[in-house]
Image: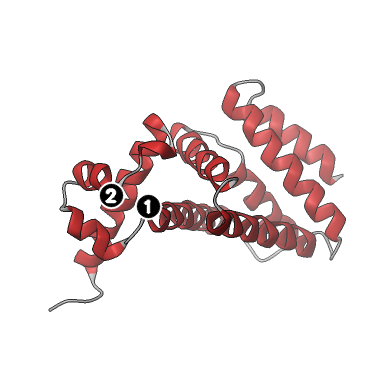
Amino acid sequence: MRGQGAAHDERRSAIVEAVFALVDTGGVEQVTVRRVADRAGVSIGRVQHYFPTKDDLLRAASVAINDRGTQRVRERATGDDPGDVLRAVLSVLIPRDEDERRLFRIQQSFETYALTNPELAEHVKQGYTDLAALFALLLGGNETAGHQLLATSIGLAGLVLTGTITPAQADKILASELN
């Protein structure tokens, strides 16, 4: 019997993980259906069953990164208080361990690739638009402050990733922005 189920989800996840591994070690240019199939240990046909094109693979992997971030926010938010949710979102945006640094590198690779790929660019733009809108909502409806906080947090994440600042320093800067 075909269709949705645990095996379906596991195969799909293995394929997305293969995309992550290829992008993290060699960039988006390394992603081909054949390489993803080899890395995931599945046939080319299996990959194409779930993701017919390279862009479908990249979009799914980008969505998976966003979904992981959303899950981490849910785990870190201790209540429904807007300030608590805001702190949880910001804590997830700053990479704190190797897995978070890896996902941030991969997402940055997708975003760079999206600069020349209109369909993926629209996906990236929508993600940032949604995040800025969430920040604005959590900041009492201030759209400008939402965009400012988005820009600051993404910039700080990049500085943390390069080792320019520590996550603790990024947290201090974000705390000063919120006061």
Nearest the viewer among 149 and 22 is: 22
Q: Quadrant of residue 118?
A: bottom right
Residue sitting farthest toward the top:
164
124 sits to left or right of 34: right
Q: Which mark is residue 123?
A: none
Q: Residue at x 34, y 51 (%)?
A: 16
Q: Which mark is residue 33?
A: 2
* Secondary element at image label 2: helix
Q: Residue at x 54, y 34 (%)?
A: 96
1 versus 122 height, above or below = below
Query: For the residue marked with disc 1, what is the amino acid?
Result: Lys
Nearest the viewer among 128 and 101 is: 128
Residue 35 place in picture, x, y as percent: 25, 42
Residue 108 visible in the shown view: yes
Q: Residue at x 57, y 46 (%)?
A: 116
Disc 2 vs disc 1: Cβ atoms closer than 8 Å? yes
29 sits to left or right of 18: right
Q: Which mark is residue 54?
A: 1
Q: Quadrant of residue 81?
A: bottom right
Neighbourhood count class around disc 2 (C-alpha, 10 Å): few under 14, some 14–19, many 20 upward: many
